[in-house]
Amino acid sequence: MTNKEESTVGDELDNLYRAVGFIVIQWGLAEQSLDMIVAIIFHDFGGNKIKNKLPKMLKPKIDYLRECFNKISDISEHKEAGNEILNVFENLSERRHEIIHGAVSTTASNNGAYAFAKLDIINGYHQVREFDFDIKQLPKLSEDLVSLGSNTTKLANQLLQINHEL
């Protein structure tokens, strides 16, 4: 490999690492705001009557919040926005999970796509699954993640405001 080829591969990998880092940071912001929503509803709106423990994992949080939006009248005006946010979490979570918990299996891209390998447990056995992450998907994914974080934080603030008004 020539110095120029090595530099190109290094630049490509740097772009991939930046993309993965961006996904990690933006998802963290969005899920932290989701945790705030869970805590606010649990502690301040009677959500502790629906579940006696705060959910910790994403799917139980989503299920819990859907139930709360359906049953708690004080937050019913935010049901539609809340469910839209929860839908986006569900839609993005699998892709985020495989990128974050997968491993890059090549150091060079194939026209911007990187091969990843992910170890899954299926029926009690480990199985390797391969998938590609095309760096060209990043602008749309980035837009979706930034919007998710913004909308989730906005809803958390709206719930805090309602709580202060009660």
Image (cartoon, grey):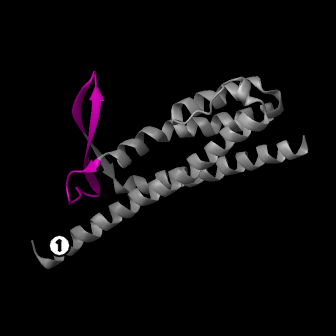
Q: Quadrant of the C terminus?
A: top right
Furthest residue toward left = 1
Q: Is residue 111 magenta?
A: yes
Residue in view at x 56 percent, y 46 percent: 31
Furthest residue toward front = 52
Left or right: 22 as drawn, with respect to 109: right
Left or right: 3 as drawn, with respect to 150: left
Q: Which residues are magenta?
A: 103-129
Which of the 4 image quarters holds residue 10? bottom left
Q: Quadrant of the N terminus?
A: bottom left
Determine which residue is flagged by label 1: 6
Residue 109 image point, x, y percent: 24, 58
Relative height, residue 158 to residue 122 (above, below): below
Residue 49 image point, x, y percent: 73, 24
Say what secondary structure mark 1 lies in: helix
Which of the 4 image quarters holds residue 79? top right
Q: Is residue 81 magenta?
A: no
Residue in view at x 78 percent, y 37 percent: 44
Predominant SS along the magenta part: strand
Which three-letter amino acid code belongs to the residue tagged 1? Glu
Residue in view at x 39 percent, y 64 percent: 18
Q: Nearer the viewer, residue 44 or 12?
A: 44
Which of the 4 image quarters holds residue 56? top right
Residue 131 image point, x, y percent: 27, 42
